[in-house]
Image (tube, rainbow, N blue to C red):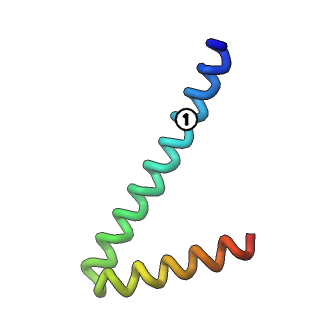
Amino acid sequence: TSQTDKNLEQATTRSYSSTNFVIRLARAQQEVDDSGHPNEESEEDEGSEEMDFEEDD
C-alpha cells in the first residue's frame, strides 16, 4: 500500500507542477492582454478555441 501511495503522490505532484506551469503561462498571457486590449474579448476567444480543440481530439 505504501508503494502505491508513493506512486500516487508522485503522479499528483507531477500534475500539480504542470498545472501551475499552465496557470503561470495563462497569467503572463493575461498581463499581455490587459496592456494590449480588453481582457473579456480575449477570454471568449480562448474559450471557443479550447472547445474546438477538444472536439478535434
Q: Position of residue 56 (x, y in %)?
A: 74, 75
Which residue lies at the image location 57% right of the left edge and 74% below the top edge?
50
Q: Quadrant of the N terminus?
A: top right
| Relative to 1, residue 51 above or below | below
Going by the image, does 33 lie left or right of 9? left
Q: Position of residue 19 (x, y in %)?
A: 49, 50
| Relative to 27, residue 49 above or below | below
Going by the image, does 14 lie left or right of 32? right
Report which residue position mark 1 lands on: 12
Q: Quadrant of residue 14?
A: top right
| Relative to 22, residue 33 above or below | below
Which residue lies at the image location 49% right of the left edge and 42% below the top edge?
16
Which residue lies at the image location 29% right of the left edge and 86% below the top edge?
38
Going by the image, does 8 lie left or right of 57? left
Q: Quadrant of the C terminus?
A: bottom right
- Disc count in the image? 1
Camera-nearest residue between 38 and 52? 52
Residue that extends furthest to the left in the rendered view of this protein: 35
Q: Position of residue 39 (x, y in %)?
A: 31, 81
Amino acid type indicated by mark 1: Thr
Residue at disc 1, secondary structure: helix
Q: Position of residue 29 (x, y in %)?
A: 38, 69
Q: Quadrant of residue 32?
A: bottom left
Camera-nearest residue between 36 and 6? 6
Which residue lies at the image location 41% right of the left edge and 56% below the top edge?
23
Residue that extends furthest to the front in the rendered view of this protein: 1
